[in-house]
């Protein structure tokens, strides 16, 4: 019986020093697409890399331990992870998803719905009546994203999971924004956790990847079988890099969220900033719930500049440290302008209804020195002239 280990230890050393061939401390990477049989009808542990691969399986095992699940399937992208779960639905099944869900997830849900592959109800999870009405339709699957993108709205995972289960639904949580270092949705009642490992888990902006972690072993087996059928399994080299990123997940995100909190506090005190969306601020509407289900407030935040798109343009051009780019969760700090970048495909009316105004900027806070980041924010604010 293995000694139980803290998640920090699992992240740092799961699979380390287990190589029986040479005693390699770091687990080797097996790029081989296929594995030789011992003899006729005598397969070894692995046959073909679409089906299984030693390094990718080690990443899956590590993610499953970190999330408290029965197992995991590593996919080629975060979208492939969402799709792997959606592919289990039947044509009359209903999916309930947040009205402000990740843009790629929205596009996927609509694309499959338009082909008649399932039904979709988009709901504001902050509206209890709307959620109750959607659950009354007996959905097969309820998708939760918390904190949401880009307004950092918090959903009470325990409460929604309990109500969804009472209605007969399975619950999937997209845990990309916090990672298992700060939130473990399976322990809050979720059946599935999905990740874009592209973000915090890999953490170095050099891999696109994903994973599904399931609470129940039968779900893990079904999802692994499906990933093999359709061929959405992640590549061995990507799995190697991602596990290398996971080794430092905890110290990275702890340092990043400390800087994010300092930046949120600074922005909050500025007259030209009309709103700061960071769950760590005591007056954030989700602060109390976040404290019950997260062990930290994360390193993502957004804020609203007085002066709209022109002020936003001047801010992003002047920080000297926040790179104007999409994505998040890397060692480098990024700034994004949701209304022209991540949420540009929404029409202006829908965007404004969702609270995404033209002066809104989103920050992904990296590992640079906090003082340098704060100085960059000051330069941005001064240039914005707000
Ligand atoms: C990036 C992201 C995805 C999609 O992941 P890819 O790796 O880009 O396919 C899904 N959900 C959230 C919350 C994301 O940020």
Image (spheres, rainbow, N blue to C red):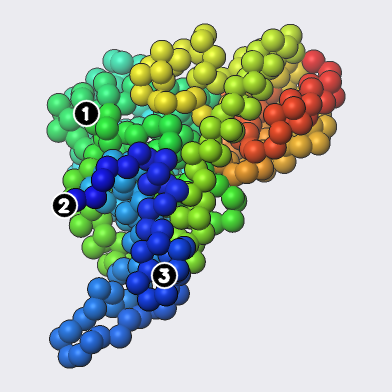
Can residue 113 be seen in this snapshot?
no
Most foreground residue, 117 or 76? 76
Most foreground residue, 45 or 133? 45
| Residue at x 74% of width, y 9% of height | 271
Per the rendering, the mark at residue 30 is none
Task: Give the mark nearest the N terminus, 2 or 1.
Answer: 1
**Residue with the mark numbered 3:** 23
Image location of residue 343, percent across then percent down: 57, 36
Residue 241 lies, with reference to residue 107, above or below; the image says below
Which quarter of the image is occupied by the C terminus? top right
Image location of residue 283, percent across then percent down: 52, 9
Label 1 secondary element? helix
- Of circles 1 and 3, the one toward us is 3
Instruction: Confirm or reject: label 1 Cβ below 8 Å from ligand 1.
Output: no
Question: How many numbered marks, from 0 up?
Answer: 3
Task: Give the mark nearest the N terminus, 1 or 3.
Answer: 3
Image location of residue 216, percent across then percent down: 18, 46
Instruction: Indicate left or right for 287 with 158 as reference.
Output: right
**Residue with the mark numbered 2:** 218
**Residue with the mark numbered 1:** 164
- Of circles 2 and 3, the one toward us is 3
Instruction: Confirm or reject: label 2 Cβ below 8 Å from ligand 1.
Output: no
| Residue at x 51% of width, y 10% of height | 282
Most foreground residue, 266 or 135? 266
| Residue at x 31% of width, y 46% of height | 65
Location of residue 7 (image quadrant): top left
């Amino acid at each position: 019986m293995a000694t139980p280990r803290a998640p920090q230890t699992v992240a740092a050393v799961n699979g380390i020093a287990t190589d029986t061939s040479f005693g390699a401390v770091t687990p080797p990477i097996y790029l081989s697409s296929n594995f030789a049989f011992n003899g006729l009808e005598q397969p070894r542990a692995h046959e073909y890399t679409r089906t299984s691969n030693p390094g990718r399986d080690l990443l899956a095992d590590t993610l499953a331990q970190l999330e408290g699940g029965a197992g995991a399937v590593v996919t080629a992208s975060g979208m492939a992870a969402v799709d792997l779960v959606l592919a289990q639905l039947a044509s009359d099944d209903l999916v309930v998803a947040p009205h402000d869900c990740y843009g790629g997830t929205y596009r996927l849900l609509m694309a499959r719905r338009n082909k008649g592959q399932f039904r979709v109800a988009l709901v504001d999870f902050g509206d209890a009546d709307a959620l109750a009405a959607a659950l009354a339709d007996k959905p097969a699957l309820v998708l939760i994203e918390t904190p949401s993108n880009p307004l950092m709205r918090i959903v009470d995972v325990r409460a929604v999971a309990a109500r969804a289960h009472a209605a007969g639904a399975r619950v999937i949580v997209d845990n990309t924004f916090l990672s298992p270092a700060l939130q473990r949705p399976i322990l809050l009642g979720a059946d599935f956790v999905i990740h874009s490992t592209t973000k915090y888990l890999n953490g170095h902006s050099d891999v696109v990847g994903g994973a599904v972690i399931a609470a129940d072993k039968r779900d893990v087996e079904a999802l692994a079988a499906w990933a093999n059928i359709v061929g959405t399994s992640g590549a061995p080299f990507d799995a190697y890099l991602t596990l290398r990123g996971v080794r430092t997940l905890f110290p990275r995100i702890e340092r990043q969220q400390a800087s994010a909190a300092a930046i949120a506090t600074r922005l909050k005190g500025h007259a030209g900033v009309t709103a700061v969306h960071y769950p760590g601020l005591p007056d954030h509407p989700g602060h109390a719930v976040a404290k019950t289900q997260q062990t930290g407030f994360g390193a993502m935040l957004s804020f609203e500049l007085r002066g709209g798109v022109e002020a936003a343009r001047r801010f992003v051009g002047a920080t000297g440290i926040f790179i104007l780019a999409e994505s998040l969760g890397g060692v480098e700090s990024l700034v994004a302008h949701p209304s022209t970048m991540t949420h540009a495909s929404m029409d202006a009316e829908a965007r404004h209804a969702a609270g995404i105004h033209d002066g809104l900027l989103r920050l992904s806070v990296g590992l640079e020195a906090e003082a340098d980041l704060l100085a960059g924010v000051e330069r941005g604010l001064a240039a914005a002239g707000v």
